[in-house]
Image (spheres, grey):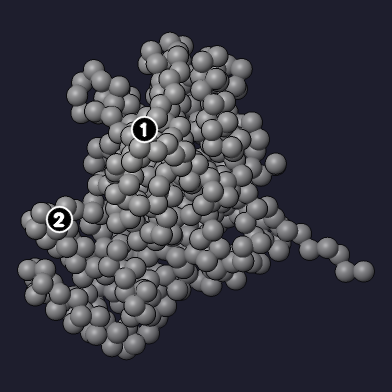
Amino acid sequence: MQSEIARGRNVVVVGTQWGDEGKGKVVDWMTDHAEAVVRFQGGHNAGHTLVIKGVKTALQLIPSGVMREGVACYVGNGVVVDPTHLLSEIERLEKAGVDVRSRLFISENCPLILPFHVAVDKAREALRESGGSGKIGTTGKGIGPAYEDKVARRALRVQDLKHPERFATKLKELLDLHNTALAGYLNSEALEFQPIYDQAMKMAEVLKPMMADVGYLLHKAHKAGANILFEGAQGTLLDIDHGTYPYVTSSNCVAGNAAAGAGVGPQMLHYMLGITKAYTTRVGSGPFPTELEWEKEGTVGWHLSTVGQEKGTVTGRARRCGWMDAAALKRSMIINGITGLCITKLDVLDGLPEIKMCVGYKLNGQTIDILPLDGDEIAACEPIYETFAGWTETTFGATSMESLPANARAYLKRIEAVIGVPIDMVSTGPDREHTIVLRHPYQA
């Protein structure tokens, strides 16, 4: 009889708010039980900050598993890749003593972000602002225009870098298209072909050894018994289909896209871990029902902003801050099929006399218990709050539920009850060790 093939257990990590939930720390912590980590969407508009033994590392494109020795790191086909930024990030990590190139695998199907994508992105935002329609709040890194080219079936992809003549032909056509928009409608400067082409061909020689058939490699690793971690970027409420449109990112951030964005079947996704702050933040424009006054010293919002050090990893922009929105979380739980939740930054709530949580909204004279689909309706929502007693004790660095204050435990229990999903982990600080584990995703 043929022996049974070993199969690993795989976990998908996604943000369940508007991004910046602390996914990087959780992914880094969980790679202790994984042999491979995969990014499956987004680009270098994402930012994951890791703190390991007090040393802070910011990653944007390379999977967070790179900080664990021996862990293979994959960039799936759902990711848009700026080769200039990728090589810069590799160089920065290697200068810090991290082995990158021998274990980084980049899908040949990844669309490329090139200089004209960045130019178009920035020019559009400037035009929106000057025209009074309001900026989307993009990072200006060319992510949206690159995804547009992908959907329009005209993108240059990583595999094109292996074929200079093919790359040149496609580049000329694509550059002409974007230059027409830049020099015309967007009132900006056209870009020249030769510098873009020469730089791309130079980078191609460095990238070729890292190009791979990522989906097939993951399939073989899974059959060999490897545990795989799928690392999402941004957050569910920024998803192009399910987020607060049009104030969203340009990719699908939800757990289901881990399969399509990595090139594997959905049967390989076993456990969906949703990451959620103990409060809520948002970078950029768009509706935010529980937003507080966070720029005025002495306010609760100011406390969340300053104690939580709420500035974007990628842009450095201050994050808007507000109370936990469990009604929005409920939407995320449904969309992602969340198995278990990880609550991060609980320690930021330390010292507040009272804590509030939104459990529903008043909208057009009616009471609803879940985030609406329509952006204008979301903007019109009036939060319905439950109020909890705060705690004066510190939760920072706690590693067991028993060591948390009774009021903190009661707050967490109520979150579980409202959203209907168990809390399996709690992060009580930025370091790997500042973690409470109730049910380990790789052992559940």
Mark carried by residue 133 = 2
397 or 259: nearer the viewer: 259
Q: Is residue 354 above or below residue 422?
A: above
Q: Quadrant of residue 345?
A: top left
What residue do we see at 33% from left, 45% from top?
Answer: 378
What residue do we see at 37% from left, 74% from top?
Answer: 151
41 or 50: nearer the viewer: 41
Give the residue number, with chain letter if any, for mark 1: 383
What residue do we see at 41% from left, 59% from top?
Answer: 241
Does residue 122 appear in the picture of this structure? Answer: yes
What residue do we see at 31% from left, 71% from top?
Answer: 148
Q: Position of residue 13 (x, y in %)?
A: 53, 48
Q: Is residue 206 above or below residue 342?
A: below
Q: Is residue 266 above or below residue 27?
A: below
Q: Position of residue 167 (x, y in %)?
A: 32, 83
Q: Earlier in the sequence, mark 1 or mark 2?
A: 2
Amino acid on which the number 2 mark rests in the picture = Ser
Amino acid on which the number 1 mark rests in the picture = Pro
